[in-house]
Image (spheres, helix red, strand yellow):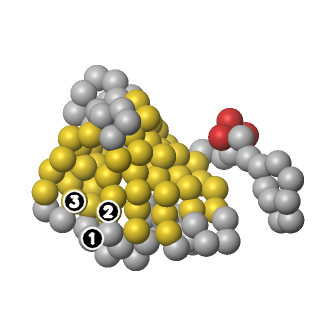
Amino acid sequence: MSGQNAAVHAWDDLSEEEVYPGIFRQTVSGERQTMVRYRYAPGSRFPLHNHPQEQVTLVISGTITFTVGGREVVLGPGQVAVIPGGVEHGASVDGDAWVETFNAMSPRRDVAPGPAKS
């Protein structure tokens, strides 16, 4: 890739953190947006939370249930959820398969949801 201030990353080279039991996150941020790759183990749960960023989530594999603003929706591969900033949402995996999603956040996210680090 060429261009002034361009950066290239490979997901396999990025560090991964376990945010909640069975939920793994990798993050890349540009100046104005953040891209997050999540991998969810079967039975994992991401608690309800909210953040000021708009979130666009693309499901790559598996089936995941999102709770958005008190409403549940089940998404599978190729489906996209658009979650407005400030709206409470969470996710759960009830099937036997791992789930992979990519989430675009705008504006850039500098503080990610998850338990407080000690």
Instruction: Name the residue that disc number 3 marks.
Output: 68
Residue 103 on image: x %, y % = 46, 53
Q: Residue at the spot x=25%, y=67% of the render?
A: 88
Mark 2–mark 3 distance (CA, rounded to whole Å): 7 Å
For mark 1, give the secondary structure. loop
- Name the front one of labels 1 and 2: 2
The answer to whether the residues at label 1 and label 3 have Cβ atoms under 8 Å apart is yes
Q: Residue at the spot x=57%, y=62% of the render?
A: 34
Instruction: Name the residue that disc number 2 marks.
Output: 83
The circle drawn on residue 87 is 1
Q: Sequence order check: which comes first, mark 1 or mark 3?
A: 3
For mark 3, give the secondary structure. strand
Determine whether 29 is above or below 86 in the image.
above
The answer to whether the residues at label 1 and label 2 have Cβ atoms under 8 Å apart is yes
Residue 41 on image: x %, y % = 38, 33
- Decide which of 95, 4 is in the foreground and name it: 4
For mark 2, give the secondary structure. strand
Pointer 2 local density, CA inside 10 Å: few below 14, some 14–19, many at least 20: some
The residue positioned farthest toward the left in the image shown = 71
Q: Amino acid at mark 1?
A: Val
- Decide which of 39, 108 is in the foreground and name it: 108
Q: Residue at the spot x=50%, y=69% of the render?
A: 106
The answer to whether the residues at label 2 and label 3 have Cβ atoms under 8 Å apart is yes
Q: Amino acid at mark 3?
A: Val
On the picture, is 16 further left or further right than 89?
right
Q: Is residue 22 visible?
A: no
Q: Amino acid at mark 2?
A: Ile
On the picture, is 55 further left or further right than 46?
right
On the picture, is 22 further left or further right than 64?
right
